[in-house]
Amino acid sequence: MTQTTRTSAGTAPGAGPRTLPAAASLAELERQAAARETRPAFGHDALIVCDQVVRIFTADGVEVQALQGLDLLVAEGELLALVGASGSGKSTLLNILAGLDVPSAGQARVAGANLLTMDARERLRYRRETVGFVWQQTARNLLPYLTALQNVMLPMQLSGARTRRRIRVERAEALLELMGLSDCRDRRPTALSGGQQQRVAIAVALANDPSVILADEPTGELDSATAEQIFAAFRTANEHLGTTIVIVTHDQTVASEVRRTVAIRDGRTATEVLRRTEVDEHGRESVVAREYSVVDRSGRLQLPTSYTEALSIRHRVLLELEQDHIGVWPDAAEEPPSPTGT
Ligand SMILES: Nc1ncnc2c1ncn2[C@@H]1O[C@H](COP(=O)(O)OP(=O)(O)OP(=O)(O)O)[C@@H](O)[C@H]1O
């Protein structure tokens, strides 16, 4: 028989003062404290860790909470898209991960670098060596008076690693070849199409072999066929070099281009779409996409607006714990709002 416990959201079933068994209490408390101390930190094995990140802006005396306790873990080698409506906080998060901005509270780490406590020198090094960028505006990615090859070599020259010129040329050529642009090596950006310019920009971002590439609307100025080529170029970089890639985009169709798409809503991660290859009983492979709601570390869950609207859920829901799932019901006792507001 199924064990069912009905409770309103936020209230533990049978909540009230709990007493510990007297004899075991001290030993049990010590055991729990020891277990907490040895428990690995949140996201200890992730490459990108955002732990309850808050970013508050103040403009004309008004506070805007652009990020409201955002949690995000990205494993090494992932290719991930961040989507969300305008104003949801995507660019704010990307600027923090890029080392261009600092959170107001929370924790943010990328490849071991603590983004809150880095000093100016560490920040410069982080931006030169740990992360690579691809921006929407091609003019921001490439210097117009340098050829494609020279653009890709520039970050290596600036890194201060004193690599020999021949090695730099070879690496830049290899990256242009990986992007399918060998025949463009001696052309300046004005002699390249928008899509070719963005692929050179990906090669530039890869020049110093960063741990992560951050891309902000990299297909925003391109038509959909060219945008597909750019996503394919990111996939190539991800698969051949193992570089972790985070792409911020408005484009909801990106979900069909990457394995994991994280949606941000009101400054928090809200849902994720995961694409997996599944094999049926006849051995046939198919790619299946499933949407999940994110549960944060405090157990908070954002219900999709379309669901809450469909069931007129406003303030409260009833939760029902079953053996393998939780049921969520609208509170039938909740009065609909009076049209006069009285
Ligand atoms: N420098 C700033 N000063 C004040 N408010 C800011 C600043 N930067 C962002 N905001 C506010 O923070 C919120 C999140 O902005 P953000 O640019 O991160 O959203 P976004 O999801 O990237 O939007 P878009 O897709 O339109 O670029 C918005 O309400 C925005 O107005």
Image (cartoon, grey):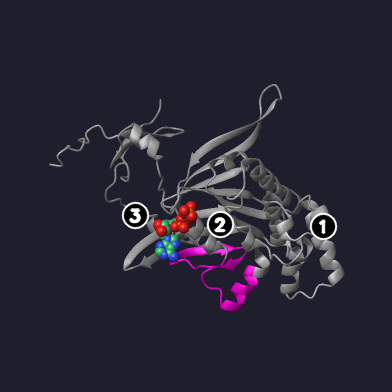
Is disc 2 surrounded by few (<14), some (14 to 19) or many (20+) residues within 10 Å?
A: some
Camera-near label (1 vs 2) is 1
Which segment is the magenta one? 99-127
| Residue 301, numbered circle | none
Which residue is identified by label 3?
Answer: 22
Residue type at mark 3 is Ala
Mark 1–mark 2 Cα distance, whole angstroms, equals 34 Å
- 327 sits to left or right of 235: left
Which residue is identified by label 1?
Answer: 174
Under circle 3, the secondary element is loop
Q: Residue at x 52, y 43 (%)?
A: 272
Which circle's residue, 1 or 2, is located before the other in the chain?
2
Residue 54 appears in the figure:
no
- 287 sits to left or right of 27: right
Q: Position of residue 96 (x, y in %)?
A: 52, 64
Which circle's residue, 3 or 1, is located before the other in the chain?
3
Q: Residue at x 82, y 57 (%)?
A: 174
Q: Quadrant of the N terminus?
A: top left
Identify which residue, 16 or 68, lies in the foreground.
Answer: 68
Asked whether the residues under the numbered discs 3 and 2 touch, taking CB atoms below 8 Å apart as contact, a structural biologist would say no
Q: Quadrant of the C terminus?
A: top left
Which circle's residue, 3 or 2, is located before the other in the chain?
3
Under circle 2, the secondary element is loop
- 314 sits to left or right of 48: left
Q: Is residue 304 magenta?
A: no
Q: Residue at x 69, y 64 (%)?
A: 144
Which residue is identified by label 2?
Answer: 43
Identify which residue, 159 or 140, lies in the foreground.
Answer: 140
Identify which residue, 288 or 83, lies in the foreground.
Answer: 83
Under circle 1, the secondary element is helix
Camera-near label (3 vs 1) is 1
